[in-house]
Amino acid sequence: MKWQTACFAALALLGLGGPLQAQPVKIGMVTTLSTPGGYLGDDIRKGFELAIRHGGGKLGGVEVELLVEDDGLNPGAARQTVTRMIQRDGVRILTGVVFSNVAMATVPQALREGVFYISPNAGPAQLAGKGCHPNYFNVAYQNDNFDEAMGQYVSDQGYDNVFLLAPNYPAGRDHLAGFKRFYRGKVAAEVYTQLGQTDFAAEIAQIRAAKPGAVFFFLPGGMGINFTKQYAQAGLAESIPLFGPTFSFDNTLVNAVGDAALGVFNTAQWSADLDNPANRRFVADYIEAYGRLPTLYAAQGYDAAQLIGSALQATGGDLSDPTAFRAALREARFESVRGKFRFGANQHPIQDVYVRKVVRGEDGKLANVIVAKVFEDHVDAYAAECKLD
């Protein structure tokens, strides 16, 4: 009897056990859920979970189990959590990373273990160029993309003396490098803050003294909220306009900032007003589920889940053949909320990038609307350095 039970259990694991279903595919999500940037990871999780809900509790018709852990914006803690998920929980697909310093501490480690990593946000240059890997896919962007678009847009608008500001960590350096790659004017100053900084009095004093024509800044999450409020309180917003990538102007942030964010321009590859079937459904269902407009992070979490689902569907949820699963990910056969979607040679998106403006919606809340397309089918600057078999 014991032998029969053990044999039947083994057959069930192989998918040969009659009515018993195979175990769900485990997906590990290690993301930032606490600290002032915690809402970013929470939005990624919400978007991912909405995709599972749209699949009736599945992705690509395959049962999945989502394991979620907070990294606390701590690279060391994130590394330990990733190790535990791989070694104890048997996770073979990981996602969730928000910040690039956490990505650099965890993604290479996961790849060495033979795990697939799908980034829903962080896109450090190191992983897009020479450090690319067959099992690493970024469904969001390469860090520089939106800044490159804003460098082009600011130049086109005639600004020729811009003050640059970002946190001193991989993404901060990438973002300013991206802006300078397409900006044709003079850099008034290039200043780096601490990651997680909340008081920007010293930096605002530097801006006042430099008297630039505009400020370009990348300060994600709570950093952006504090800076934009303090900048307006200092009386600089009317005379020195602010520009930045979407990370400083998502819907949650601009409504926390209030009127100080009105009229600010920012760049992104997605917006709630993009008119395609997948996005209309996503936005409507997100509002119904959570009572507010989705942010870029939620959209990227949703697309990350849909990408994984497309590969699970193509392989029947069988991860025993990594070559087949990798090929299915590369195909990216899913309906993106961005509209068209495809991967470049380094498994980062080739995509359009837009300029958005912060306006007040009919409901009285602030929101972003697209005002121009800056790039079409944009390829990141590091793709040529990536050599994948």
Image (cartoon, helix red, strand yellow):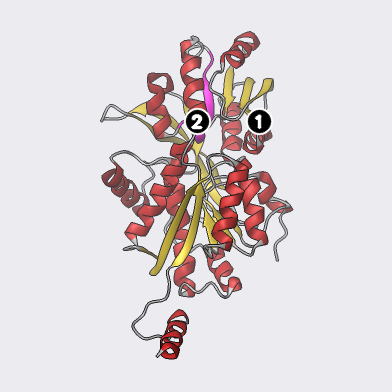
Specify few, some or many for label 2: CA neighbours under 10 Å numbering under 14, 14-19, or 20 or more: many
Kind of element beneath mark 1? loop
Report, in whole angstroms, how far the alpha carbon at label 1 lies from the one at label 2: 16 Å
For residue 5, side relative to residue 95 (left or right): left
Closest to the observer: 224 or 36?
Answer: 36
| Numbered marks: total | 2
Residue 49 in percent (x, y) is at: 38, 53
- The residue range painted magenta reads 240-249
Work out whether residue 379 can be spotted.
no
Residue at 45% x, 88% y is: 7
Residue at 57% x, 30% y is: 218
Check disc 1 and report the residue beneath it: 168
Q: Is residue 160 above or below residue 125?
A: above
Residue at 42% x, 69% y is: 24
Quadrant where the image shows the N terminus: bottom left
Q: Earlier in the sequence, mark 1 or mark 2?
A: 1
Q: Is residue 136 above or below residue 6?
A: above
Quadrant in which residue 240 is drawn: top right
Check disc 2 and report the residue beneath it: 248
